[in-house]
Each structure stands twice: as structure tokens, then as C-alpha cells.
Amino acid sequence: MRILLVNGNTTTTMTETLASTAREAAAPGTEVAGVTATVGAAIVSHRAEEAIAGHAILKAIADHEEPFDGVLIGVSTDPALGAARALLPVPVVGMTEAALFSACMLGGRFGLVTFSLASAPGYREAVERYGLAGRLAGLRTIDIPLAEAYAKREKLEDAIVEVAEALIERDGAEVLILAGAAAAGLPPLLQPHVPVPLLDGIVCGVRMTEAMIRLGAPKPTRGSYSPPAENRYTGLDEPTVRLLRRWAGTPEGN
């Protein structure tokens, strides 16, 4: 099977890290193709940047013409997840979504480790959006600029272990999630120092995407996740318009 991993950040080195982490976690025979957003923030960390990333993710999917069996959104709080899921005939999974639901199957209450004060409210809202507010033990933030957190992994690792201890001992977390793309690949390095499961959204995401592909559920033909009705679009590039119309079976003209 082929999985398209879409990095909604514009940093290509991050895409390489995400794709490498996904490939290591994937089952034999699964191919992971990483693509990078061409517009938006280098590292998404603000509400406005998430909104831009949503458009960039749809554009990246539209620009990728090779066939794929599933899509994994590899950025922050899963921008454009619902839109991509409604547009595509294949499973679409968000890295944060996958980590949250995986945590629920490993323990009672989970804790979130985030890496920016500006992004923390977005993660709380994501937990609520997925209906899991009652399972959240706590959310603690390591207030390191995301670019620095991504570049200086040793400093980040020490801070994560310290915050993890507080989430476990003070907040009662039984599973921990390292939130965001900047943490990809870190859990295996830190797990020996943390006494509860430590989850990586990319690892959870690629395995959840594989499972959804194997499930083989049909594409909805009714409701909000069915293809959009015929419409007119202004100011969008041609690949994005084709994406909007391809699965709806609408004509190519404006």
C-alpha cells in the first residue's frame, strides 16, 4: 500500500524526519511518500498559520498525482483533516487524531506535551473536538521556540522528561503524547526514562492509516463527508479545483 504523508509546514527537513519516522513504523510493503507544503509557515504554531496550512495541505494533495491508498496529515492539530476526508475516496488520518485515540486504548487518562504557548489552546480544542476532554489528565507546555526545539534535540529531550514526570505524578496521566511534528522520532529515545507509554503522532498515524486502508470501508455518498456538490470556484489553482471536482464527478470548466 502507498501512504501520502503531507507536511503542512514548509520545512523540507521536517518532511524528511516525518517520512523517515513513518517508514520505520510502517509494515513491510507499505510505501510512504512525503510531500511538503509550498505556502505558509516554516513551522506552524499559530491559529492563523493553521488556517493557511489547511489550504496548503489540500493544494499539496492536489499537486501529488501519483495514486495513493491513504493520506496522513503530519502537522500540529490536523488542519484540513475533515476537508481532505470529504474530498478523497481513500482514508485520511490526522497525526494528532491518531495519537489521541491510540492513547485512549492504552490507558485511562492521557497527558499532552506541547512545545509552544501559542499552540497549546489549539490542542485543548482538538481534544474537545474529538470528544475526549474527559480523558485529558493535563496539558503542559515546554515554552521553547519551535524552530529551536526542532534544531536542538538534546535540550528538548531533557525538558520533555521533566514535563512528563509532572504530568504523571501531579496530573495522573497514564499515557503521554508528544504533540506536534517537531517531536517525531523522539519517543523511542525517551521511553526508557518515562514510566508510561509515550506516543508519537506520526507512528500512531501511519499505523492507523494502514489499519483504515485494510478495513476497506466505503466512501460515504451522503452526509458531510460525501463529495461536494457542483460549484464554481474563483482564484484557486487548477490542481485544487480538479481535486474539488474529481470525486464529485463535476465538469472541469468554471
Image (cartoon, rainbow, N blue to C red):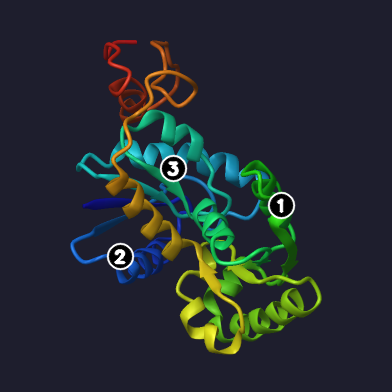
**Residue under the point 62% across and 70% down:** 176
Residue 234 falls in which quadrant of the image? top left
Residue 34 lies, with reference to residue 55, above or below; the image says below
Residue 57 lies, with reference to residue 218, above or below; the image says below
Q: Which label's residue is closer to the chain start, 3 or 2?
A: 2
Q: Nearer the viewer, residue 230 or 56?
A: 230
The Cα–Cα distance between marks 2 and 1, rounded to whole angstroms, is: 28 Å
Q: Which residue is mark 1?
A: 124
The answer to whether residue 28 is left or right of residue 59 is left
Residue 144 falls in which quadrant of the image? bottom right
Residue 106 falls in which quadrant of the image? bottom right
**Residue under the point 32% across and 26% down:** 238
Q: Which label's residue is closer to the chain start, 2 or 1?
A: 2
Which SS class for mark 3? helix
Residue density around tag 2, few if under 14, some if 14–19, many if 20 or more, within 10 Å: many
Q: Which residue is mark 3?
A: 57
Q: Which residue is mark 2?
A: 26
Residue density around tag 1, few if under 14, some if 14–19, many if 20 or more, within 10 Å: some
Residue 217 lies, in percent from the top left, at 33, 36
Q: Nearer the viewer, residue 131 or 251?
A: 131
The three-letter amino acid code for the residue at tag 1 is Arg
The three-letter amino acid code for the residue at tag 2 is Ala
The three-letter amino acid code for the residue at tag 3 is Ile
The Cα–Cα distance between marks 3 and 2, rounded to whole angstroms, is: 22 Å
Q: Which label's residue is closer to the chain start, 3 or 1?
A: 3
